[in-house]
Image (tube, rainbow, N blue to C red):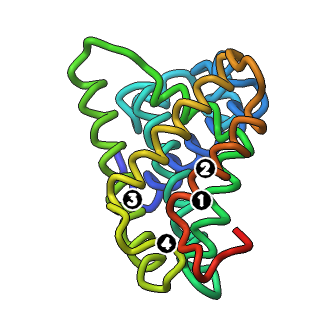
Amino acid sequence: MPKVSTEHKEHVRQRLIDAARAVVLREGHDGATTRAILEEAGMSAGSLYNYFSSKDELFEALAEQVIGENIRGLAATDGRPGDALVGLAVELLTVPDLPALAWFRGRLSADPEVRAALSKFNGAVVESFSPLLAAAQADGTIDSDIDAEALIELFDVIIEGMNRRAVTGAFVTDFERVGRLAVDVLLRAVVNQRENVQA
């Protein structure tokens, strides 16, 4: 039997992630069955488990990719890092995020593996955004006295809760109204007002 190259494995793995994203965006998380994902990827039943141990692991990979895309987008932005970070904050607080990410992070489980995966992912969010926030503090956009890691985690908790509420349809008002208020409160608290009065 011929050996499958690392590149081929990565290509197929990415095809499954892309298919999961497409299905979730089109059908929502409830419609993102293993069968629907495999049909979208043009793969046969059972293929998923050659690349991911479970559908949960596939959604974890998708969630990590979404976060990575946001970070790479910020890093590539011209101008002050803080301006790009503030722009992303406004976007994440006013437009619901990928439903798969909210579902992945919203699972309540006694399973230690699920808790460990969520903890690892939450740590990766803080670790990934810390250099960007440090740059925003260095460029004067964000108040340098703010505890950067705690701010990232606070923001992440707000985003997670808002997206979970959006996915479950549990808002009393709506995502955008709550998000706009969160933007106003957070920016007043952390943006260096001396240089960013317009924020």
Q: Residues within 10 Å of mark 3 (few under 14, many from 20)?
A: few
Q: Secondary structure at mark 1?
A: helix
Q: Which x, y percent locates residue 108? A: 38, 16
- Please tell me the numbered disc located at residue 188: 1
The earlier-in-sequence mark between 1 and 3 is 3
Q: CA distance from mark 4 to mark 3?
A: 46 Å
Q: Amino acid at mark 2?
A: Val
Q: Classify residue 14 as left or right of residue 92.
A: left
Looking at the image, is 21 positioned above or below residue 126? Answer: above
The numbered dot on residue 5 is 3
Which amino acid type is marked by label 4?
Answer: Ile
Front residue of 43/142: it is 142
Lower position in the chain sequence, tag 4 or tag 2: 4
Q: Amino acid at mark 3?
A: Ser
The residue carrying mark 4 is 142
Disc 1 residue type (three-letter): Arg
Upstream in sequence: badge 4 or badge 1 = 4
Question: Badge 2: how crowded within 10 Å, few (<14), some, or many (20+)?
Answer: few
Q: Are marks 2 and 1 in contact (CB under 8 Å)?
A: yes
